[in-house]
Image (cartoon, helix red, strand yellow):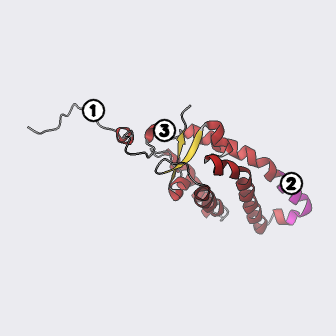
């Protein structure tokens, strides 16, 4: 008589991830979609002012450049550089952007340790940032990246590329 009891509660992944011998973050501490969205929104608001100032200045000095494809690529690369410059200290010291600090979330590797700066920049930021500058393909990848958050782990495409997760920190 070794049949399974059909009335037993099903086991969950969180029971496995709460095992102290497995330090990897489990579903119990993934950052919520709302926390991730608000953190990203805060990050955009932080970098938008310097980017708009540069676009406005270039529009006055070289309007033909701003309205060209080459100008768009230059502005896109400049935006990436500005974002990295603003967030670098926080990524390096805390594995958090300004938005993640406000929302009390953090970027960790798959073992649950804070992600290092090279992983954040070279695997999370640059690949999709550069890809986003490619006409049509960039838009499709950006949409797929955003929609990926609706998976169970709340990971975006850049998390999969970098081997990272965003977790909610304890209060």
SS for tag 1? loop
Residue 56's label in the rendered image is 2
Location of the N terminus by quadrant is top left
Depth check, mark 1 against mark 3: the one in front is: 3
Q: What's the CA distance linking mark 1 and mark 3? A: 22 Å
Say left or right for 74 vs 62: left
Where is residue 50 shown, x and y percent of the image? 81, 51
Q: In this view, does 16 lie above or below 70?
A: above
The residue that mark 1 highlights is 9
SS for tag 2? helix
The residue that mark 3 highlights is 29
Where is residue 36 shown, x and y percent of the image? 59, 42
SS for tag 3? helix
User: Which of the marked residues, 2 or 3, is nearer the chain's N terminus?
Assistant: 3
Asked if the residue at tag 3 contacts the one at tag 2, i.e. Cβ–Cβ closer than 8 Å, the answer is: no
Q: In this view, does 85 lie above or below 25?
A: below
* Magenta stretch bounds: 53-64
């Amino acid at each position: 008589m070794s049949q399974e009891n059909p009335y037993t509660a099903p086991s969950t992944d969180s029971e496995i991830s709460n095992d102290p011998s497995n330090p990897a973050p489990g579903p119990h501490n993934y950052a919520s979609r709302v926390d991730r969205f608000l953190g990203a929104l805060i990050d955009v608001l932080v970098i938008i002012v310097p980017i708009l100032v540069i676009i406005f200045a270039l529009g006055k000095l070289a309007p033909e450049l701003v309205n060209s494809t080459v100008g768009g690529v230059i502005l896109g690369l400049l935006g990436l550089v500005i974002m990295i410059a603003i967030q670098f200290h926080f990524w390096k010291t805390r594995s958090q952007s300004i938005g993640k600090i406000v929302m009390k979330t953090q970027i960790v590797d798959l073992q649950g340790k804070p992600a290092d700066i090279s992983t954040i920049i070279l695997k999370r930021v640059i690949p999709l940032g550069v890809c986003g500058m490619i006409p049509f393909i960039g838009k499709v990848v950006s949409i797929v990246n955003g929609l990926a958050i609706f998976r169970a782990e709340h990971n975006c495409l850049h998390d999969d590329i970098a081997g990272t997760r965003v977790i909610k920190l304890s209060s």
